[in-house]
Amino acid sequence: MTSTTSFTTPNVESKAAFELNQVITIASGHFIHDTYTAFVAPLLPEIISMLSLTLTQVGGLTAIQQLLSLTLTQVGGLTAIQQLPAILNPFIGYLADKISLRYFVIFAPALTATFMSLLGVAPGYPALVVLLFLTGVSTAAFHAPSPAMIARISGRRVGVGMSLFMAGGELGRTVGPLIAVWAVSLWGLAGIFRLIVVGWLSSLILLVRFRRVSGKEFRHKPTGLEKIRPQLKTFFLPLLFVLLPRAFLVAGITTYMPTFLTSEGATLVLAGASLSILEIAGVAGALVSGTVSDRIGRKPTLLIAIIASALLTFTFLQVKGWLVILVLLLLGFVSISTQPVFLALVQDNSPENRAVANGLFMAMAFLAQSLALVFLGIAGDLWGLRATFYASAFISLGAIPAILALPKGPAPGNAELQ
């Protein structure tokens, strides 16, 4: 397969084709894109020093409890606010279903790289707010249509395609902070604008790879939101009741883990490394989960992941020493890994409006995570994080009935596009 291989329009024959080169190209773009979105946290100390920001102003940009000395309630609320542009996902998905999907995916890495790399030369707080908001819009523009593209080029192996796609993003979020720190140490905060070139190079590669692809091949029939409406009750409502309980567990461990470990007497090294451990394990899990769901089905895969995540959270709260690292690896592997399965499930059930359906899913996931973060923060302030983590694990099991209520997807071993 050459770099100019074009996508075929959906038909019976093309459903069986798995365009590995093109899947890897989009997954690589996901890696580059999400590497930049992970810059904010490690750059905050330098930004505070550069602009002499108050803690209130910084609180509007991110949610790092150790840095800002905020309550856990404030952390949850600010983390939700920071992701506000995610609510644009359904609208971006709607546009992507009306026009060619490729332009959203091609140019988003360049735009996100530009906005994030200019943080070091922002003249003041308002400029920071604008840059971060534009980053959120660009991120939504990438993540709403790209899974739809993956589904269209993955044939019967949608789960495999989603696994590769999500592994790219998880890996980007893992190495992003390291690259940001390296760049600041080499050039200073103002010099990180040099990193823009990598994002634009990524977009150039995507443009070259897709240069012979007709825009019509990425365009759906103009069915709009009308085709989605019947699914709101039969599919998206039970999906919401899967996402919400799950969000309590996943949002808790990915946001409050370092704070919890520090409060329990863990070393700063272990507390600081906990999220990296979870993310690295999540990369491996993302590579596996979608493939497994192609073989045994989406719903069984989600059931296994939800139950295993709760049990591992209970185990994590009981172990000490080196066992903490082992359990964190397993917990990251099963808890963070379900995203490819959700993406594949959405594509299975929305073959004619892939991008808008994915945008709706991402907006629902954002709202679920935002609500969970706020309630977890309140609970952490009132009862402590240990009790909150126990509660979040119990709450996550509430997703089981909703998973069983989801529509039956493609048969295992034949997870084709419908």
Image: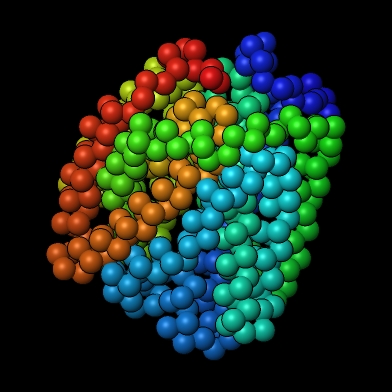
Left or right position of 414 against 143: left
At x 43%, y 14%, the residue is 412
Give the tally of numbered discs. 0
Which residue is the extreme one toward the front? Answer: 226
Q: Nearer the viewer, residue 353 or 108?
A: 353
Q: Residue at x 29, y 69 (%)?
A: 72
Horizontal side of 85 relative to 102 (left or right) equals left
Q: Is residue 110 left or right of 175 when viewed as pictured?
A: right
Residue 188 is situated, as x and y percent measured from the top left of the image, at 68, 75
Q: Is residue 232 above or below residue 299?
A: below
Instruction: Kindly identify the residue that appears in the image at 67 percent across and 41 percent down.
Output: 98
- Return the residue nearer the eye: 228 or 188: 228
In the rendered view, would you say 251 is above or below 59?
Answer: above
Residue 139 in percent (x, y) is at 59, 54
Q: Quadrant of the N terminus?
A: top right
Give the percent coordinates (x, y) of residue 59: 43, 76
Is residue 279 visible in this depiction of the protein?
yes
- Tell me: residue 352, above or below residue 363: above
Report which quarter residue 130 is drawn in.
bottom right
- Decide if residue 277 is in sight here: no
Q: How are the colours assigned in the image?
A: rainbow
Check the image and report above or below for 223 versus 114.
Answer: above
> Residue at coordinates 35% horizontally, 36% vertically from top-left?
233
Residue 372 image offset from top left, x and y in percent: 30, 56
Q: Where on the picture, by quarter, is residue 307?
A: top left
